[in-house]
Amino acid sequence: MIQTVRKTWIAIALTLGLALAGPQDNSLVVGASQEPRVLGDFWNFITAQAIASEIENLLWAGLEFIDQDGNDQPLLATEVPTVQNGRVKVTDIGDGKKRLEIHYTLRDDIYWSDGTPITSKDAAFWFEVGKHPGAPLQDPTYWERLKEVRVIDDKNFVVVFEPAFFYDLVGSAIGLAPEHVMREAWEATKAEIAKLDLKKDAQKVTDLYHKFISSFASPKALNQGKQVFSGPFTVRRWVPNSSLELIRNPKFHIEPPGGADKYVQKVVYRFIQDTNALLVAILGGAIDATSSVALTFDQARAPQLTRRAEGRFDIWMVPGVIWEHIEVNKFTNVQSVRDLMLDKKETRQALTYAMNRQGLVEAFFQGLQPVADTWVHFQDPNANPNVRKYPYDPEKAKAILAELGWKDLDGDGYLERKTEDGRTVKFEIEYVTTAGNRIRERTQVFFQNDLKKVGIKVKINNAPSAVVFSHDFFSKAYDGSWKGLFEFAWLFGIVDDASVFTCNDLITGANLVPTPDNNYSGVNFGWCNDEFDKLRAQAMVEFDAEKRKQLWHRMQEIWAEELPAIPLYWRSNPYVIKKGLVNFISSTYHGSFGYPTTQGWLIGWEQNGAQKIYDQADYATPVR
Amino acid sequence: MAQNRIETPWTLAWRRFRRHRMAIFSLGIIILLVALALSAPLLVRLGWIPDPNLQPEGPNLAASYFLPPGTPGHPLGTDELGRDVLSRLIYGGRISLLVGFTVALSSVLIGTLVGAIAGYFAGRAFLFFAGPASPTYRELLGRGGLAVVLLSLVGLGTALYLFYRTEPGTALLGFAGALLAAYLLNRLPGLGEKLARALWYGFSWALLLGFAGLIVDVARTLAEPGMARGDLSPIELAGYYLAHLGALALLAFGVVGRIALDVDVVISRIIDFMLSLPGLPILLVLSAFMRNPESALGKLTASLFGEAASVAIIILILVVFGWITTARIVRGLILSLREQEFTLAAQALGVSETRIVFRHLVPNAIAPIIVDATLQVGLAILVEAGLSFLGFGIQPPVATWGNMLTGAQDYIFYAPHLAIFPGLAILLTVLAFNYVGDGLRDALDPRSRV
Amino acid sequence: MLAYTLRRVLQIVPLLFFISLVVYALVALQPGDPLEALIFANPRITQEEIEELKKAYGLDQPIHIRYFKWLGLALQGDFGLSRTYAIPATEFIFQQRLPMTLLLSGTAFLLAVVIAIPIGVYSALRKYSLADYVITFLAFVGYSTPVFWLGIMLLLIFAVWLPELLGRTEPIFPPGGYVTPGLDPAEVGFWPYLKDRIWHLVLPAFTLSVISMASWTRFMRASMLEVLSQDYVRTARAKGLPERVVVYKHALRNALIPIVTLMGLAIPGLFSGAVLTETIFSWPGMGRALFDALVEKDYNVAMTALVFLALLTAVFNLLADLAYAVVDPRIRYR
């Protein structure tokens, strides 16, 4: 009995051995904890998932990509359009608005995986589908501003934005979709849509768009070879809930140094939902590298992993673009905001001084997730390193609070003050976050202790994320749905436009402070700074990077002085990478959000002759 | 009346129970658990265990997280926030036992009540609806006059307001309120009963009106896109008019008609309905729905119970499903008991029906009810733990055995003790209740002899 | 009997209608809606734009209208598209998830039957022996154990402790999933592939089967004891029939009847999957699909699954009642 069992194990180990060849057969096995629903939803009609974007980087090439240092590089285009090279034309259209015409030229040597040349038609097709009435767009303003894709000839076209913003020049301005493959299905979809009333049958129209996408992008469609590819890899097989196998695309135009055969020929994504199981798979050697959506921060530091990593793996922490912070309710019509004077910058400064943020990241993250000073990431080319900082200083916090009139009147260890209308109020502040998020709950209690030391009582009021992020709770701070502090995270990519902290958008005229007047639109919870708004309006239409940087610097100074929110730290993404694997690198802005697959054609094994071009150590901190 | 030498059934049962050694042992464990749970705040004050939500302070915080069992001061170690596991376990036990006992008690009470009503009144219809021109209502009018009309209008108005001006949660609460009001009125001497009926009929008119309105509304909205285009298919058109006709017919019937319902049939259908619902998924849906802070129900629980709102919600939804088993058992028993001689005798003597049901019939069904209650405690604890584990149950910072396990799986590599102890606590408690239930079943079974 | 059956079958129709109504209301009235996540993907989005999208997903209409629209389409067999997968909800549930669930719960069911019946019989035949006490105790433990905790413990033992003890990096049993990702039967051959699948099935199937195993063992024991005390068994013994024949031919057959009914009632549960077990072992089945659909507000998927489950439960309740009537002549139906 025992004999047969052991034999079974050996057989399984052998089969696993075959599957985990790695360098031997020049393949790469990536472990991910999420699985894309569809691949190739070029318009994001269905969803926008990080794991899908990461894999799509390997399958479809864009006009440009954002490199490991955050700079634009051409990919399908011959060069990155700039004002200097004459490809970008800026026109003033009054009211502080600008019109942007971007001239792209496609390379001559680019083909879809079926051999059809990639042409301007593919750009025009992409534009046509997204612009078609009734499309369920998740970013309607972008499509509103994208006015035209004017085809000049097979390889040249002009993209027009109006009103244009600086970020239209960051990364590819538009996408591409294989017109020769998708046209027929699109015409049929269009005909179906034409039969419907866009207003009354909106849902049916949406369903038609979804069906159109899934007929190319679902696992079934991809396995049947319904789609073509323009990136360094193509789909070979997708087994839902298990794995996705990609093989090298011979039609891809970039030849990595030393020849493509020296680099990875096959990429297998293994989808292991449970991150513990994923960790076990890594320990067992079945995984060569982890995806950007894989282990949790804590798991990557698990002694079981670090102990066994020696000589086998490198574990990296890459600073990400997710900004953990505490939002402060600053609406003075809320009683407790008035009582606690949360609308005063001094109060917010005192709170920040009283919170030991450095201590927090040391205690919980071994310092691997850096403290944030403003909302702009320190790796952002526009970051201003000389803004006002708030090191842990409870004495200073106490001094500021005393100056504001806070004093422990009843001797209970917490501060009180007499308000203008003669009431005595205690400094008891509500602190909301998503229940069940262990790190946030830890943070919360950590700060509860810190604030207690300066005489501030924290009342924790957590609820599941579906509840705290529901419109009626999240956006209605004006009505006091949440009254004090609210910890959550924003994702600020390289195209961030500071809209989170804008009060009046001077370009569109919109008010971004959620009040009944604007139907609770926007996410700026009551901070209005005219200078900040003006600088932002200038920066938005400043297409000269150097000049924009000046404006952005000043905005950060104002922000750090006023502290509309309390910045905590930047989350880091863990990556576990087998020794010898090169150019599978992540950095803060690689491919906009740090995807290690951004320059997929360069990924390879050193043992097989792949050249190491980038060093992960330049962009991340190793975990010991 | 009972003479000293004759044993009451209870002492007899107790003697039988004592012979079930596991049950006695389990009873001891339960008493110990209850004592621990009750004395938890005292233990904290005495300094024997730390506060369950107390987190370490000081410069080297990371060193106080995930301490293994056996660490001085933390016999069962600390969790991912450096809190004492033993203390949290004891406090979690408070919640688990609270949930278990409350759910079992309420379900059994409700189940017994519903089951007894269904069983006793089976075959006797209750006048659910009587139109304003129906003979029944005219008869009522003849005796009460203006007060009856006024009260009916009050019922009608309230109900219409509830349907059209509020969202479902409030409407449900209002509906329950109206039932209660009718019941209380009924208890008043003199005109009470009549007024209660008047109020109820007014309410039932609104139900009918609302139903007719709903039919028309649905038909209109569904037909709208087609009508706007002007190409309604014949079937759609027919449906559209049919719906209107139907609504009209319903209204016409509503003026003169009356509807009588057999309570037993209604309750049995409800039980069938509940039994056909897929259990756990529905509990998940229900839990999220009730916690919705936008609904009146969510607001009410949140304002009443504050941080412990999720505890109240869990108890509530477990009761929603918990009463069914008891109701079925009791209904079956009462159906047979009411045919027996002693019931007939009581009826012949003119004893009131409430008294017959609760003084004569229910006490005769008490044995299975007690067993059922004991088993329900264990079940409620298990289900609560499962829901909390999935994040749909009791929310942190309130510690329960279930939500202590939620995060434990994430840390299973370096802190397995976080997963082991809460689970063991659940196992031990539920096991104890099941054994006691088993012991009680044997002890209360009239067929078993000492 | 026929009239009774017909009436019961007809009753399923309004029952399903009410269930779908209530379930739809509960699902649709969940806090938050699928579009609120958009704010986080794109803080620039305005409330007006969100309203526009709500229209695109049909979320702007009052709930009863949405329900009847859904009902109208569902009656024609159209259960809508999954919002997150953009494929028909029925395809997602019945083709992708249901087979996985049936595999898991079917295995667990068989496991429970195969273990519970012999052990129950054995326990009854050796009444009050040490073995009987041990079995009884284990059965009590079995149905007092929280399933999810049992799963976690098994994971702990087989994926963490034992490998560490044996100095292996490979877990004894895999900690999740239904197959080693990337394992291709075309490459490794059929048998190793099958072994891998079975290897993945062991822990979840065992976890899922424990409760039914425990309770069926108890029922089997009780039923067997009941039958053994009946007159006809005594008669059979008195006739001098060998004990083996008495027990297995006469007693066991009759003792199995109530157990079979009980098992029949457990069948709908096979389809509903096991949210907890599937969650712990990352098993891509119905329970998990339903849970995810609720979390992600994929209403069409949630409704399809819930209504299907309700239908199954109603049908099997009916079948169990009918089976009872056939088996037990004391029961009469009007």
Image (cartoon, grey):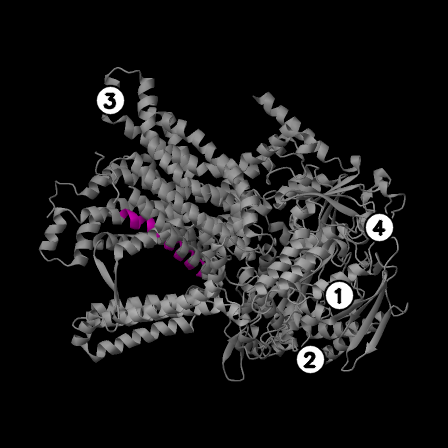
Residue identified by numbered label 3? C234
Q: Is residue A39 visible?
A: yes
Inspect the magenta stretch and tell me whether residue C205 lies in it. no
The x, y position of residue B250, in whole percent, is: 33, 68
Amino acid residing under circle 1: Val
Q: Position of residue B165 (x, y in %)?
A: 42, 74
Q: Secondary structure at mark 1?
A: loop
Q: Quadrant of the N terminus of chain A?
A: top right
Question: Marks 4 and 1, how far apart in space?
Answer: 24 Å
Residue sitting at 43 percent across and 40 percent down? C267
The chain identifier of the residue carrying mark 3 reads C
Determine which of the numbered discs, if any, sits on residue A509 in the image.
2
A456 is higher (above) or lower (below) than B29: below
- In the image, residue B383 sits, relative to residue A442, either above or below, namely above
Q: Which mark is residue C254?
A: none
Q: Residue at x 75, y 39 (%)?
A: A312
Q: Which residue is mark 4?
A: A614
Name the residue located 79 percent from the left edge and 76 percent from the top edge: A98
Q: Amino acid at mark 2?
A: Gly
Vertically, is B372 above or below A203? Answer: above
Q: Which mark is residue A495?
A: 1
